């Protein structure tokens, strides 16, 4: 009877993990193809990103309000001093990362975007070494070389290569390295009380919106003000369809962050990292099959080389975590460059169970 109960518990945990991984895949892969689909007809990616930020802030505020009403416990609200001094750098880096990433979809394919964004691990490691969150080791140098070499092979003589789009997404990956390093440092400050991703997203979105607004005003403001799809619309039905499509993207963006949080809190950050590796493979296969992205043998070899570097990085994280004797805030971040928030500790898992109480 006891063995049967253990087997049943194992099967249930496996099914739950698989379900959470599939939910994460739906939101993560879905928003990648959504962004590419929308930018084909709506050429204002920065405005799209700003609306997504507004939707994420709305849903974060609603989530906090519901939890506060059900638990009768006040959620953290930072003072203006802490908000502007500590959160603003992370918010600005995050806004530029997301904004440039969405902007690049105007010029490049999903496959090139996916491959280039995978290189974010390279910049994360570099900035982790600069901020002394990681110690320089031979294995980390090997990880950097594998990822950099894989990126070079994937883009070398690519038939669908676009310099402008590649520069945008590579810049986003570079800023993403700063973003995740600052995010890790922000969440490790226990006195701020931002260990919960919902609280962090709630505080980040307004500053991200303001940080992205000057870029939007310079590059899209005038064109958007004269666009017949938004401000000079003549067809109310077209306007509603455009706004509905933009709102859908905001839901996907919020769902991505929340599905990552569910997966990490119910399994581990290592599970999310491994799932992220397979997600990149699935994205490239879908891009080649559905969108007709042309990927040569050399490109596939470069992608495999890059994934081997990411896999080595994940393996090093697992060994480091096991050697430290249990779960803790991980030093390195996972391969999914589109993560909203993924840092986890066993203490946060206990404190935030009220988010999942019906």
Image (tube, grey):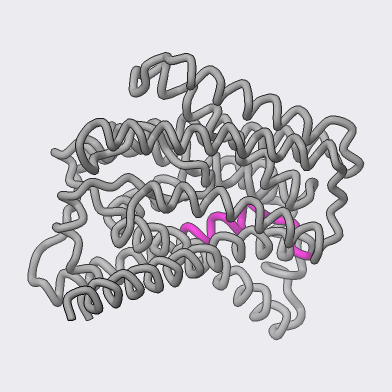
How many callouts does the rendering have?
0
Residue nearest the observer in this picture, 11 or 341: 11
Residue 52: give x, y in percent of width and height: 52, 61
Q: Quadrant of residue 48?
A: bottom right
Q: Is residue 354 left or right of residue 85?
A: left
Q: Is residue 242 magenta?
A: no
Please name whichever residue, 190 or 265, is drawn nearer the observer in this view of the structure: 265
Residue at the image point whose x is 44% and y is 36% from the top:
315
Is 322 situated left or right of 123 in this image? left
Q: Is residue 47 magenta?
A: yes
* Residue at the image position 15 percent from the left and 49 percent from the top: 347
Region in magenta = 41-53
Q: Residue at x 41, y 52 (%)?
A: 271
Q: Main secondary structure of the magenta part?
A: helix
Dividing the picture into quarters, in which one does residue 192 lie? top left
On the question of residue 213 being in view, the answer is no
Q: Is 32 drawn above or below residue 240 in the view shown?
A: above
The residue depicted at 42 percent of the width and 14 percent of the height is: 136
Q: Is residue 284 above or below residue 90?
A: below
- The image shows residue 152, relative to residue 330, as above or below, that is above
Q: Measured along the vertical axis of the image, is residue 287 above or below residue 107?
A: below
> At which x and y percent is residue 213?
54, 46
The x, y position of residue 257, in whole percent, is 42, 58
Name the one closer to the observer, 298 or 259: 298
Can residue 323 be seen in this snapshot? yes
């Amino acid at each position: 009877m006891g063995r049967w109960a253990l087997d049943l518990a194992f099967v249930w945990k496996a099914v739950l993990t698989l379900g959470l991984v599939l939910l994460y895949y739906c939101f993560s892969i879905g928003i990648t193809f959504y962004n590419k689909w929308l930018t084909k007809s709506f050429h204002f990616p920065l405005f799209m990103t700003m609306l997504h930020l507004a939707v994420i802030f709305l849903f974060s505020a609603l989530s906090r309000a519901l939890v506060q009403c059900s638990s009768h416990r006040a959620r953290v609200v930072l003072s203006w001093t802490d908000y502007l001094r500590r959160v603003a750098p992370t918010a600005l880096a995050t806004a530029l990362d997301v904004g440039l990433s969405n902007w690049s979809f105007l010029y490049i394919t999903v496959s090139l975007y996916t491959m280039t964004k995978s290189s974010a691990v390279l910049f994360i490691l570099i900035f982790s070494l600069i901020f002394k969150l990681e110690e320089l080791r031979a294995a980390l140098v090997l990880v950097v070389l594998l990822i950099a070499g894989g990126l070079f092979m994937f883009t070398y003589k690519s038939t669908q290569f676009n310099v402008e789009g590649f520069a945008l997404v590579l810049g986003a990956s570079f800023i993403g390295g700063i973003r995740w390093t600052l995010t890790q440092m922000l969440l490790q400050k226990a006195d701020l009380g931002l260990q919960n991703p919902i609280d962090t997203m709630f505080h980040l979105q307004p500053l991200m919106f303001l940080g992205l607004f000057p870029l939007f005003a310079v590059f899209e403001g005038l064109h958007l003000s004269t666009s017949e799809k938004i401000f000079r619309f003549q067809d109310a039905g077209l306007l509603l369809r455009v706004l509905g499509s933009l709102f859908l993207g905001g839901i996907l963006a919020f769902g991505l962050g929340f599905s990552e949080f569910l997966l990490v809190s119910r399994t581990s950050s290592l599970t999310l990292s491994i799932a992220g590796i397979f997600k990149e493979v699935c994205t490239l296969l879908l891009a080649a099959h559905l969108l007709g992205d042309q990927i040569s043998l050399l490109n596939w070899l470069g992608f495999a080389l890059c994934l081997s570097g990411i896999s080595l990085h994940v393996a090093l994280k697992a060994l480091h975590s096991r050697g430290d004797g249990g779960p803790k805030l991980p030093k390195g971040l996972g391969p999914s460059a589109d993560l909203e928030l993924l840092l986890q500790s066993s203490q946060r898992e206990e404190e935030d169970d009220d988010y999942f109480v019906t």
